[in-house]
Each structure stands twice: as structure tokens, then as C-alpha cells.
Amino acid sequence: MNLEALIQSARDQNLHVLHIVVRQQGKIIAEHEFSKEAPDKLWSVSKTFTSMAVGIAAHEGYFDIHDKCRLPSPPRRFVCLSFRKPR
């Protein structure tokens, strides 16, 4: 697979893409790394990933969005989720 057009488009638009991975049937068939891997602050990405993971888990039956949730007392800066076996 040729990623050159996608790579060039990301560069032209200054999208700050770090890495592209293309999978087909679970196997990596193409990838491109724009820069060497390095630590970065990913607060916003963390919220996006968490909401996506929670949505997938709810869809797969690990919990329902209407389930009751107990918040810790005193409140903490993080929340732990408990998952049940899918229905």
C-alpha cells in the first residue's frame, strides 16, 4: 500500500500526525512514523480514548449507560470503572 499521498496531505495541512498505521484483517499492512517516538502531554487524547473505550464496553454489554455509579468520598481526580461479563 502506498501512503505517500496521505503522508504529504498531513504534512501540507500541518496536522501534527505522529504515526499512521493501516491494518487489514488485524495485520499491519502499512505504516509511517513522522518523527521519533517521544513522551508528550496527551490530556485531551486521554479523554477521547476513555470515552471511546467506555462506549465500546457499553456496546459489548460490560455495563449499561443507565447503571448506577458510586463516586468515591471524598472525590478524587480519577474514576475507576468496574466491568461485568458481557450479557
Image: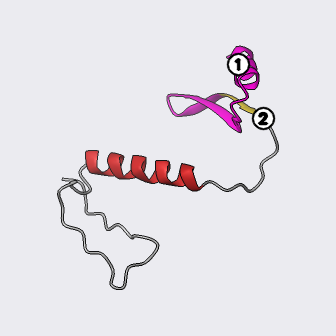
Query: Which residue matches tag 2?
Result: 34
Residues at circles 1 and 2 in contact by the CB criterion of under 8 Å: no
Mark 2 is surrounded, within 10 Å at the Cα level, by few (under 14), some (14 to 19) or many (20 or more) other residues, namely: some
Residue type marked 1: Ser
Q: Earlier in the sequence, mark 1 or mark 2?
A: 1
Residue type marked 2: Phe
Looking at the rendered image, the disc whose residue lies closer to the viewer, 1 or 2, is 1
Q: At x 36% / y 52%, what residue is drawn? A: 54
**Residue sitting at the far bottom:** 74
Q: Which residues are magenta?
A: 1-29
Q: Closest to the observer: 87 or 67?
A: 67
Q: Is residue 2 magenta?
A: yes
| Residue 84 higher or lower than 65, as above or below | below
Query: Which residue matches tag 1?
Result: 9
Q: At x 75% / y 20%, what residue is drawn? A: 12
With 44 as the anchor, is 83 left or right in this view? Answer: left
Q: Name the spot of residue 7 as percent of width and height, x first.
A: 73, 22
Which structural element holds mark 2? loop
Mark 1 is surrounded, within 10 Å at the Cα level, by few (under 14), some (14 to 19) or many (20 or more) other residues, namely: few
Quadrant housing residue 82:
bottom left
Q: Name the spot of residue 16 as percent of width and height, x first.
A: 71, 36
Tell me how the rendering is colored: secondary structure
> In which quadrant is the N terminus drawn?
top right
| Residue 74 higher or lower than 80, as above or below | below
Q: Name the spot of residue 23 as percent of width and height, x first.
A: 57, 30
Q: Which mark is residue 63?
A: none
Q: At x 25% / y 74%, what residue is drawn? A: 70
With 3 as the anchor, is 48 left or right in this view? Answer: left
Which structural element holds mark 1? helix
Q: At x 36% / y 85%, what residue is drawn? A: 74
Q: CA distance from mark 1 to mark 2?
A: 12 Å
